């Protein structure tokens, strides 16, 4: 896959993959450099959807446990949250209920929407 196509896909659909890297303090450039390998191992799909979070982290040498939750942690840890608006969704990084990392310059989901109602949080524990 050529770099233009790869970057377009990642830019349009890779918000959760980017936020997962942010959660464990890895550089976002890893997603671009490793995308073809992640795709080849079926860890992400052709739209950069993370298919298996634990395998995603393992690819980068991190043993993890990723829990879906309806409650956000309030302990100062980093976590992913799904925001929705008009049938669209976007993942952002949050700490203590505040958005602190957004892969988009502007997100309608965050600005005009709300946190999803069904298990919107992904809490990453490094083990």
Image (spheres, rainbow, N blue to C red):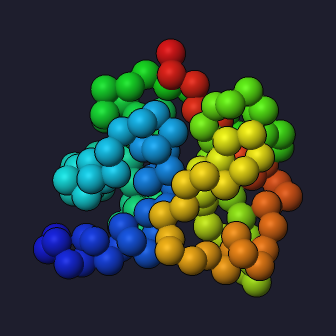
Viewer-proximal residue among 15 and 45: 15
Which residue is found at the position 76% from the left and 84% from the top? 86
How many numbered tags mark residues here? 0
The residue at the far bottom in this view is: 86
Viewer-proximal residue among 97 and 125: 97
Which residue is found at the position 25% from the left and 58% from the top? 32
Q: Is residue 5 left or right of residue 27?
A: left
Q: Is residue 49 above or below residue 34?
A: below
In what quadrant of the picture does the N terminus appear? bottom left
Viewer-proximal residue among 70 and 74: 74
Q: Is residue 42 above or below residue 79?
A: below
Tell me, yes or no, if residue 58 can be seen here: yes
Tell me, yes or no, if residue 50 can be seen here: no
Q: Is residue 90 above or below residue 79?
A: below
Q: Is residue 67 left or right of residue 27?
A: right
The residue at the far left in this view is: 2
Which residue is found at the position 77% from the left and 46% from the top? 97
Which residue is found at the position 79% from the left and 61% from the top? 116
Name the spot of residue 115 as percent of width and height, x first: 79, 61
Name the spot of residue 65 as percent of width and height, x first: 56, 26
Q: Is residue 49 left or right of residue 43?
A: right
Name the spot of residue 105 as percent of width and height, x first: 50, 74
């Amino acid at each position: 896959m050529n770099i233009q196509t790869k970057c377009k896909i990642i830019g349009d659909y890779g918000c959760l993959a980017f936020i997962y890297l942010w959660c464990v303090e890895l550089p976002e450039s890893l997603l671009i450099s490793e995308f073809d390998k992640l795709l080849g191992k079926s860890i992400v799909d052709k739209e950069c959807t993370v298919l298996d979070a634990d395998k995603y982290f393992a690819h980068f040498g991190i043993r993890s446990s990723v829990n879906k939750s309806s409650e956000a942690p309030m302990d100062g840890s980093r976590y992913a949250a799904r925001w929705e608006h008009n049938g669209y969704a976007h993942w952002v990084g949050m700490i203590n209920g505040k958005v602190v990392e957004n892969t988009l310059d502007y997100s309608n989901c965050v600005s005009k929407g709300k946190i999803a109602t069904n298990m919107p949080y992904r809490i990453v524990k490094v083990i």
